[in-house]
Amino acid sequence: MMARAWAPLLWLGCVAFAAIIVARARYITDLSVFLPVNPTPVQQLLVDQLRDGPASRLILIAIVQGDAAARARASVALANRLRKDPQFSSVNNGAPDALQSDREFLFKHRYLLSESVTAERFSAPGLHAAISETIENLASPAGLLFKSLLPRDPTGELLNIIEQLSRSAAPETKDGVWVSADGSRCLAVAQTTASGSDSDAQARAIDAIRAAFASAVRAAPPAMSAVQLKLSGPGVFAVAARAKIERAAVRLSIASGMLVVTLLLVVYRSLPALVLGLLPVASGALIGIAAVALGFGAVHGVTLGFGATLIGESVDYSIYFFIQSHRRRGTQAAARTWQQLWWPTIRLGLLTSVCGFASLLPSGFPGLKQLGVYSICGLIAAALVTRYVLPVLLPAGFAIRDLTPLGEGIAGALRRSRRSGGRALTLLLVGLMALSLAALYLYRHTLWNRELAVLSPISIEEQNFDAKLRADLGAADVRDLVIVSGPDLESILRSAEQAAHALQPLVDAEVIGGFESPARYLPSLATQEARRGGLPSDAELRDNLRQATMGLPIRSGRLLPFLEDVEATRHAALVTARDLAGTSLNAGFEALILHQKDRWNALLPLQNPASGREIDLARVAAALEVGQVHGAQALDLKLESDALYAGYLKEAIRFSLAGFLALSALLLIALRSALRVARVLAPLVLSVCLVAAGLAVSGVQLTILHLVGLLLIVAVGSNYALFFDRQASSGDRGSEALTLASLIIANAGTVMGFGLLSFSQVPVLVALGTTVAPGAFLALLFAALLSPRRSSRAAKAGA
Amino acid sequence: MSGAALGGAVTSQLDEVLGLLAMRQHGRVEFIEQQFLAILDHPIESSGELRYDAPDRLEKRTLKPRAETLVLDRGVLTVERAHGRRVIDLHAYQQIQPFVESIRATLAGDRSSLERLFRLEFNGSLSRWTMTLVPLDSKLKHYVAQVRIDGARDQLLKVEIRQPDGDRSLMTLRPAATP
């Protein structure tokens, strides 16, 4: 009677508390779940780069369809609208106005910013050469643009700076805007102010681009109505992936929920049973989410999406409870008997599941950690609700359909097959095991997929389109880069300048096509100081200029404004990051600077050589070493991130094996018989191996989500095997039929639910579905086939 | 004879000249170009070769004082020098357009292109003519006041480009010595 009072109250209290936490929890939806928690410094950089780096903030824009002129007009109109939007730190579509607006800034600071400024350039011979070149430039129409600047800038420093900034490979230009090489697409790049990991902000930015495009098209003549907008990039992918996972998770959860509900209705033929049966699952899900929210501060969307499927096992508890306790007369008495007879088995099954899921806890991926916490807490809660709350809530006269006939039928079939099969059956299973082990051995090198991209919910077509746009845009894809690190901005700008010095020979040797550097936008103070210090005094410059212009068609008297500007620069302050912040050049500069807590990093993205060959990073590293560039590293980002993932995959596999060992130890303690432990484990090992082998043979490379699926097979299957073990040792013949029936129903629910996931468009869900559905079925089948015959020995021992 | 009254006989003569020009598919001439710039004490002189392939490829190879190749191909201007190459889109730098398009469209006999950019004036006869082009666009007028082309039948003899500040360039053409 005590239980009657406190269990439901405690349960209600817990559920209410959990509901409050769940309602107040923060939910995050970016893809950072697949990024590690405790990275090395290089990994940290990589993670920051993936999450917040310049590349993560890029939205690639393509304008397709319609005719070329309409596309170009749409590109201009779109860019003009977006430039007014504070959500974007820069919008570039190749139109020249962006750079022109910064001319004043560049012109003002030209003697500090231009890489050609040295003391020699301001000597008489240096000036002579520079001025001659500028005059010669005037002969060409392009040089004529700078004619009016000649008196102030006779050495052509502005042109030098513009060339220095445009040295990165730019796409082709047509009708004033960037186009793809085949001219079929107009291209633009927008950089968001918000970081790439802020999916909500990314979603808003994407909406803003679509709205701006729609309004640009509306405002234009009908010729433009044919043009279309296509977007790509990390932020776009993250938002699409989120929507996809959310949609798939919601749709599939509803669908699989309906399937299970239908199944249970058909089985129970009782509405109260259905409602009561779903209580443990619902409580488990709620408490699971609350536990994650309490433990991690924020719940990840992926956890919500997969979590419910992971604790689908908890439906089984109520199924076992209802079906197995049915035949006893008197509801309360039946429940009590069930508790004595079967609860220990379920408890053991629960503990083995917990062992399995616990192997997710030490994982380096926060996503897996969360799934571990969610499943463990959810399962324990569901089991406790089944054990302590359901019996109390059962209404008087509660009844479900008697499933004894179903169970009897299956039991009979099982007995017959065992009797007739006998030795052949054992041989068959041993053969299957050997075959799958052989297959796993054959495929051992390609068994696991070690690339991070396989987890991406983005389709191959979308990934290809992205690659095409990046190729169009030239340098945008930062795969190879040099990173220089230091304690402050000045030190990394200095190192970046040294690195540029070391890299230039590689450009000339066509090992690399070119590189970008933040120091091109903002030279280090040391360099600026050297340039400023190298500027001659007014008297000296006057003298040098007089000599320099001898033989040139320009008199030095014409160049007084030049003298004034040089003199002004000699007394001017150096250019700082703050000065740059007001210009549109800032976006380009900031894109190449990564500031972590106490560490600054400058990124120097490398471009592939024109030959199309891949960059030989070893030569890059060697050049940096010879150049003694401080704190510089040459990195292949894709290789690094894949290595990172491979490391975590390896770790997860190791933890899973440890979890399996712990589970075996637990069983040995509980069952106190090596033989019984072997009988319980054999069907699980067999189904795990067979499923893994089946996936490998059918060309599927296993990912970390497959590993989670294999864990689930063990978790669910251990319940089956333990029931058979209990059945065999108890010798209660009457309950055998109902046990079998409950297992069949539970198994059908699991197979249906996970089978449905296999039809998803999201690779991670497919991975779970294709692993668990066949695995759970096989586990039950093997557990049944391998269960010990009810020999007289066992019957006697049980009695 | 003024351009405003460009009619009747003049129009037919202009069309005749342009028709003759349009018939030429390739051309190769030597040029000497002088730039008269107020800021400079004496003109700068350059020389080289001009090649034309109908309808929209124009190549200006400067040999002296410094090698430079300027190629106008379907609206894209490529400047090539000893150290490096620059590609300039004419749409992006409209101010360059009258400098190159005046010559290209004349060589192509492309009256509609000429009239899109300039107000046309034609003087003289088929054997010795002068065409004066004044930019229509007010922005372009900041860069080019007028372009004057002297020719005889389908040969261009002189191209003079005047800038509004008084600076001008004069390009004198003569048939290239056979290579």
Image (cartoon, coloured by chain):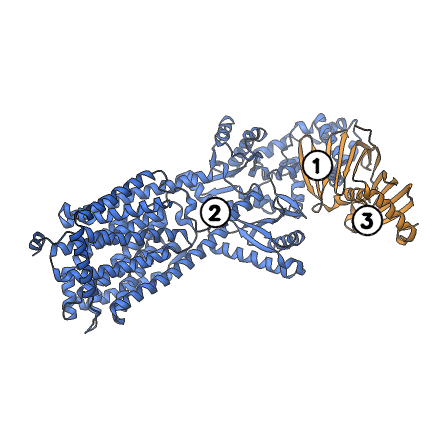
Q: Nearer the viewer, mark 2 or mark 3?
A: 3
Q: Which residue is mark 2?
A: A52
Q: Nearer the viewer, residue A89 or A267?
A: A267
Q: From the viewer's perspective, is residue A650 above or below residue B177?
A: below
- Residue A282 visible somewhere in the drawing: yes
Q: Which residue is mark 1?
A: B79
Q: From the viewer's perspective, is residue A400 above or below residue A492?
A: below
**C-alpha separation, residue under disc 1 versus residue under disc 2:** 39 Å
Mark 1 neighbour class, 10 Å CA radius: few under 14, some 14 to 19, many 20 or more: many
Tell whether label 3 touches label 2 (CB within 8 Å).
Answer: no
Q: Nearer the viewer, residue A350 or A715?
A: A715
Does A498 sit left or right of B97 as displayed? Answer: left
Which mark is drawn over residue A188?
Answer: none
Hey, which residue is sitting farthest front in the picture?
Answer: A420
Q: Which residue is mark 3?
A: B111
Quarter of the image with the N terminus of chain A is bottom left
Whether marks 1 and 2 lie on the same chain? no
Task: Residue type at mark 2: give it.
Answer: Asp
Q: In orange, which chain?
A: B
Whether marks 2 and 3 lie on the same chain? no
Does B75 sit left or right of A765 as displayed? Answer: right
What is the chain identity of the residue bearing mark 1?
A: B
Residue A661 screen position, x and y as percent: 23, 44
Mark 2 neighbour class, 10 Å CA radius: few under 14, some 14 to 19, many 20 or more: some
Which residue is rendered at x = 65% and y = 58% of the image?
Answer: A224
Q: In blue, which chain?
A: A
Residue A256 screen position, x and y as percent: 34, 61
- Residue A364 visible somewhere in the drawing: no
Tell whether label 1 touches label 3 (CB within 8 Å).
Answer: no
Task: Residue type at mark 3: give it.
Answer: Arg
**C-alpha separation, residue under disc 2 versus residue under disc 3:** 55 Å
What is the chain identity of the residue bearing mark 3?
A: B
